[in-house]
Image: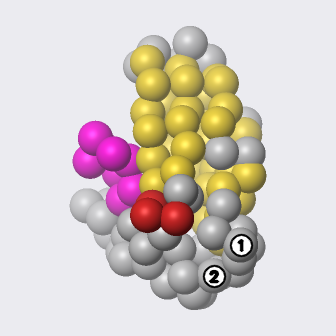
């Protein structure tokens, strides 16, 4: 399992990770008005995930969620509020 943190300085840490197919990634908010949205639309999360009983709207609330990545490839993601400031990353699934 890998944890990616959304930080108050509008960064993800680590922003770029490599995992194996079937691994999980936990995203969490460490402060700031953030969410996490896949560039391909496959997920949009903050207080849970859209379409899964949660709300992916950016929020300053403390949140965390976990996603399993089963298919090899690259998933790019961003914070919708701060993508223009470079708040984005990539998950490479082997």
Total numbered labels placed on residues in the image = 2
Report whether residue 65 is seen: no
Compared to residue 15, the image places residue 63 above or below, namely below
At label 1, counting other C-alpha atoms closer than 10 Å, the crowd grade (few under 14, some 14-19, many 20 or more) is: few
> Does the segment drawn in magenta span residue 44?
yes
Q: Is residue 22 left or right of residue 57?
A: right
Compared to residue 32, the image places residue 10 above or below, namely above
Q: Is residue 89 left or right of residue 83?
A: right
**In the rendering, at what x and y percent does residue 27 appear?**
62, 56
> Which label belongs to residue 32?
2
Splitting the image into 4 quarters, where does residue 17 fall? Answer: top right
- Name which residue lies at 46% across and 55% down: 78
Reading the image, the residue beneath label 1 is 9
Residue range corresponding to the magenta coloring: 36-45
Splitting the image into 4 quarters, where does residue 25 fall? Answer: top right
**In the rendering, at what x and y percent does residue 3 appear?**
72, 48
């Amino acid at each position: 399992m890998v944890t990616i943190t959304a930080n108050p300085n509008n960064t993800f840490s680590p922003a770029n990770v490599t995992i194996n197919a079937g691994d999980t990634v936990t995203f969490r908010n460490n402060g700031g008005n953030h969410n996490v949205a896949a560039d391909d639309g496959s997920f949009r999360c903050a207080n849970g995930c859209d379409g899964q009983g949660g709300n992916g709207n950016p929020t300053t609330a403390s949140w965390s969620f976990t996603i399993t990545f089963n298919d090899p490839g690259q998933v790019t993601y961003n914070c919708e509020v701060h993508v223009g400031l470079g708040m984005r990353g990539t998950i490479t699934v082997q």
